[in-house]
Image (cartoon, helix red, strand yellow):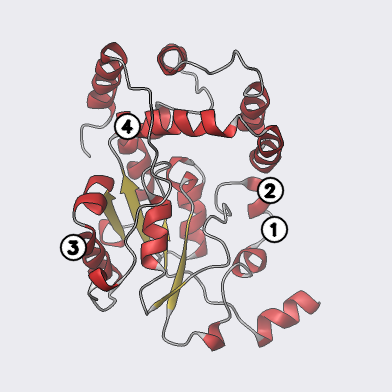
Amino acid sequence: MIHTLKQKIWPSLSPAFLVAGAQKAGTTTLFHYLIQHPQIVAPRKKEIDYFWLDHYYEKGEHWYLDHFPAAFSHKNKITFEATPHYLFSKKAAERIYKFNKNIKIILLLRDPVERAFSQFQMYQRKRKDKSALDISGEKYGGELQVFFEQLKSPDFFRDFDEAIQREWAAIQKGEMLAPYLIAQGFYYQQIDNYLKYFPKEQIRIVYNKNLKSKPEETLNDIMQFLKLKKINWKNFDLKKYNEGKYEETISTEIRKLLENIYEKYNTRY
């Protein structure tokens, strides 16, 4: 009752757009850039995970909207959230459409080979904190929870080449294998799923390499897409966030394998 009353008296801003992925493509950096724009107000947290995690989605729209600031204090501004898993999720696109068929979607893509390697390195960092693995496992559930539990073993998932070969063998059998290093780079299938629900005019594909090499131009292209005023981004903080530096490199053999895989699966994008 109190919750319902709060929604009536202090309605939250509803997101006008979403940054829907991809994982390890720079969504954190883009998020921090966007919230500096004077017409954009930040959500209470970057990743809400509402549209892809069933146990969050079942909480309903009021729960989701509670993650956004009160509308009365941010007149003439818009808000958003950035959840990388929305692109890979098979359920998210339809759920987002049911929530708001007019919402705009930003998809941030990175070279899929480099993306897979960055994801692998992320898990190597995560395994150093077993309590964090427990928290992540409980949050995601399912196959990812099993994976996070396995990650506690010192002999599991230590070698990138082995992890790729193991997943590719599973894919060739028609199986999906967490944490989906290869599969999350199948952008063609993922974008095609969004195009089943949203017209192209509501989707903007942004490339990670452009965000890095020409951030001001890329951001103002996004502003045009969102119909917000262009600003001089040189006056704002454009540092990189969560940018990994790795001692390891991708072997020539595995790089070639991945390039061949993605040439087959991502011919359109």
Q: Quadrant of residue 142?
A: top right
In the image, what residue occupies the spot 42% across and 70% down?
16
Q: Secondary structure at mark 1?
A: loop
- Label whose residue precedes the other's in the sequence (2 or 3): 2
**Foreground: disc 1 or disc 3:** 3
CA gap between label 2 and label 4 equals 31 Å
Residue at 58% over, 67% down: 44
198 relative to 86, above or below: below
Identify the residue position indicated by label 2 in the image: 55
Q: CA distance from mark 1 to mark 3?
A: 39 Å
Instruction: Report the mark closest to the observer, 4 or 1.
Output: 4
Residue at label 1? Answer: 59
Which class describes the residues within 10 Å of circle 4: few (<14), some (14-19), or many (20+)? some
Q: Are marks 2 and 1 in contact (CB under 8 Å)?
A: yes
Instruction: Relative to 211, say whether 249 is above or below.
Output: above
Q: Are marks 3 and 4 in contact (CB under 8 Å)?
A: no
Q: Quadrant of the C terminus?
A: top left
